[in-house]
Amino acid sequence: MLILGLDQSITRTGFALYEFPGDERHMRCGSFSCKDGADPEEKCELFARQFKRLVGPKERRPDFICWERARRIISAYPKKPNPDLLGLGGDDPPVWTVNADQLLLQEIQGIIRGEAISYRIPHESVTPATWRAAIYGKGGGKLSRADAKAQAKAYCKALGVDAGNEDEAEAACIARWAATCSQQFRLLAAGVAA
């Protein structure tokens, strides 16, 4: 069965195709970006086109898709004050903002889910803490973003997976999690084997 693991974002989406059961060293990893879009809608459209190319061809369509679940809570932070307006009441009180790309992750996740439903591909999303704890072991779910990315590269290197960047490495780890920990995938695999 072919598993597609995804570590999706606007900046760079990593993907891994894992034929299970099979040797992890044969995982095919890659990545694509949609950050060149002029506005959020165009970025999401670029993502949708790239993703459709990944799952569309029937001869290599995955049997299961697993992706990193987007956070439901969006972090806000105070904007840096405008030095031209200091003392003039322009930035008093401070203005709060969010990372605009975080807002798009929910939409991107919807694109993935929609395509999976459209092609009738079984699918699941998994929180970063869940897959990292299962793959990296105790404490793995509490790693900082930078440490988790470095751990993914090290994990792939130890398995012999050719991941070109951290996002591809995390996608490979997510595919591995799906193969070894996902109840949905286990039920699917048992149904195929029966």
Image (cartoon, rainbow, N blue to C red):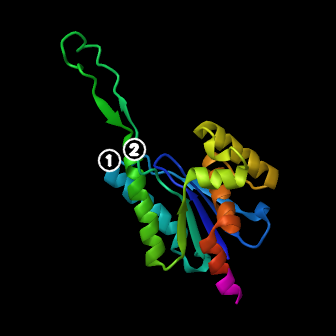
Q: Earlier in the sequence, mark 2 or mark 1?
A: 1
Magenta includes 102? no
Q: Residue at x 63, y 79 (%)?
A: 187
Q: Which mark is residue 39?
A: 1
Q: Amino acid at mark 1?
A: Asp
Q: Is residue 38 above or below residue 94?
A: below
Q: Residue at x 32, y 34 (%)?
A: 97
Residue extending farthest to the top is 87
How crowded is the residue under tag 2: few (<14 C-alpha within 10 Å), some, or many (20+)?
few
**Residue 16 percent coordinates (x, y):** 64, 61
Q: Residue at x 60, y 49 (%)?
A: 167
Tell me the CA gap for discs 2 and 1.
Answer: 19 Å
Q: Residue at x 66, y 75 (%)?
A: 186
Q: Is residue 158 above or below residue 66?
A: above
**Residue 194 percent coordinates (x, y):** 70, 90
Residue extending farthest to the bottom is 194
Quadrant for the N terminus in the image: bottom right
Label 2, on which residue? 74
Q: Quadrant of residue 108?
A: bottom left
How crowded is the residue under tag 1: few (<14 C-alpha within 10 Å), some, or many (20+)?
few
Magenta includes 192? yes
Q: Amino acid at mark 2?
A: Ile
Q: Is residue 30 above or below residue 146?
A: below
Q: Which mark is residue 70?
A: none
Q: Is residue 11 left or right of residue 170?
A: left
**Residue 121 percent coordinates (x, y):** 53, 77
Q: Main secondary structure of the magenta part?
A: helix
Magenta residue span: 190-194
